[in-house]
């Protein structure tokens, strides 16, 4: 509830209940204004529920939770916002990345070590660490901002449209980086996205939001199984699924709707004429 007991009172989320398994990859999708960003801001206490409970591992967040109890949760759940490079502020890349660990009580030596490791994890070369972050390319600045979140060693990484504004190659490289970080650091990843290909390629489960409600949860195959329902939610199909639908009109058959290029290729094998193979 936004601004409760005031003339501007409005429901931000209603009837939302779900579980995210540890070390899984969950995508949150829905049309603009459906409540996606409001939902993820509850996961580390940027917003507190006016009713109900948010449980993240050993942390519980309710309307009575005080701000002094949120610091550990902020470290446990790292947030990468849309256009995170806009949050850069320090004089050098190294100091900017180290800000989080220093704020959470690490010594200067520990914070610098964590900053160097995080920079390495996101593919930033050592020679950039002593430069101003504002001298870097847009892609490098975004990696600095992401490293600043990772340096605090979160166990849950929340990504709110982290590939916004990137070209297809940049988006693919960024998503591959997140997948590697998840595997290497055993992270639980929660991704807010409008890119259905990323849902198909990476997510173990997807949550569909509409009008501040959670209206469907399941695997990507379950979410996209009914293309007409997906379109009714103002969502697109993954590229491979959309292409498969066009192929059906030309006589091709599919046991199940392919969501990825690999799934599409497997199901097309044997249906193409020999000269087309």
Image: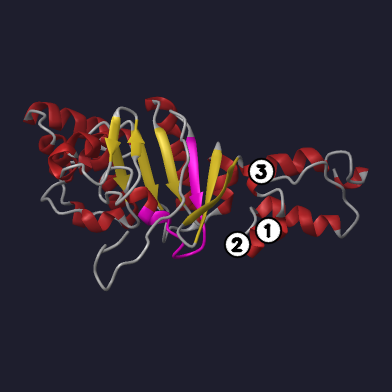
Locate the N terminus by quadrant: bottom left
Q: Look at mark 1 in the image and give the residue it sits on.
A: 229
Which residue is outermost to the left?
108
Check if mark 2's residue and mark 1's residue have beta carbons within 8 Å: yes
Locate the C terminus by quadrant: top right
Q: Which residues are magenta?
A: 25-38
Q: Report how far apart the C-alphas of labels 2 and 1 lie in the structure.
A: 7 Å
Q: Report how far apart the C-alphas of labels 3 and 2 lie in the structure.
A: 15 Å
> How many residues crowd mark 1 within 10 Å: few (<14), some (14–19), many (20+)?
few
- Count of numbered labels shown in the rendering: 3
Q: Position of residue 229 (x, y in %)?
A: 68, 58
Q: Position of residue 157 (x, y in %)?
A: 35, 39
> How many residues crowd mark 2 within 10 Å: few (<14), some (14–19), many (20+)?
some
**Of the image marks 3 and 2, the number of the one nearer the N terminus:** 3
Q: Is residue 102 left or right of residue 209?
A: left
Q: Look at mark 3 in the image and give the residue it sits on.
A: 222
Q: Quadrant of residue 268?
A: top right
């Amino acid at each position: 509830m936004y601004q409760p007991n005031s003339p501007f009172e409005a429901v931000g989320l209603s009837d939302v209940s779900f579980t995210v398994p540890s070390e899984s990859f969950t995508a949150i999708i829905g049309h603009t204004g459906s409540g996606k960003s409001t939902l993820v801001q509850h996961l580390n206490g940027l917003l507190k529920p006016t009713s109900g409970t948010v449980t993240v591992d050993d942390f519980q967040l309710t309307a009575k939770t005080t701000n002094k109890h949120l610091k550990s949760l902020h470290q446990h759940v790292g947030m990468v916002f849309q256009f995170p490079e806009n949050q850069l502020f320090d004089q050098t890349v190294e100091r900017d990345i180290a800000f989080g660990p220093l704020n959470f009580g690490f010594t200067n030596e520990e914070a610098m070590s964590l900053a160097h490791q995080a920079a390495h994890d996101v593919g930033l070369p050592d020679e950039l660490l002593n430069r101003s972050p504002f001298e870097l390319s847009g892609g490098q600045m975004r990696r600095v901002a992401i490293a600043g979140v990772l340096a605090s060693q979160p166990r849950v990484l929340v990504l709110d449209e982290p590939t916004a504004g990137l070209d297809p190659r940049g988006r693919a490289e960024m998503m591959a980086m997140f997948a590697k970080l998840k595997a290497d650091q055993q992270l639980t990843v929660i991704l807010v996205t409008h890119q259905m290909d990323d849902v198909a390629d990476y997510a173990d489960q997807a949550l569909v939001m509409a009008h501040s409600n959670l209206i469907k949860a399941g695997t990507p195959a379950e979410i996209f199984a009914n293309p007409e329902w997906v379109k009714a939610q103002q969502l697109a199909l993954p590229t491979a699924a959309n292409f498969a639908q066009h192929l059906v009109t030309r006589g091709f058959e599919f046991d199940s709707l392919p969501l990825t290029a690999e799934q599409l290729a497997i199901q097309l094998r044997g249906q193409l004429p020999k000269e087309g193979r």
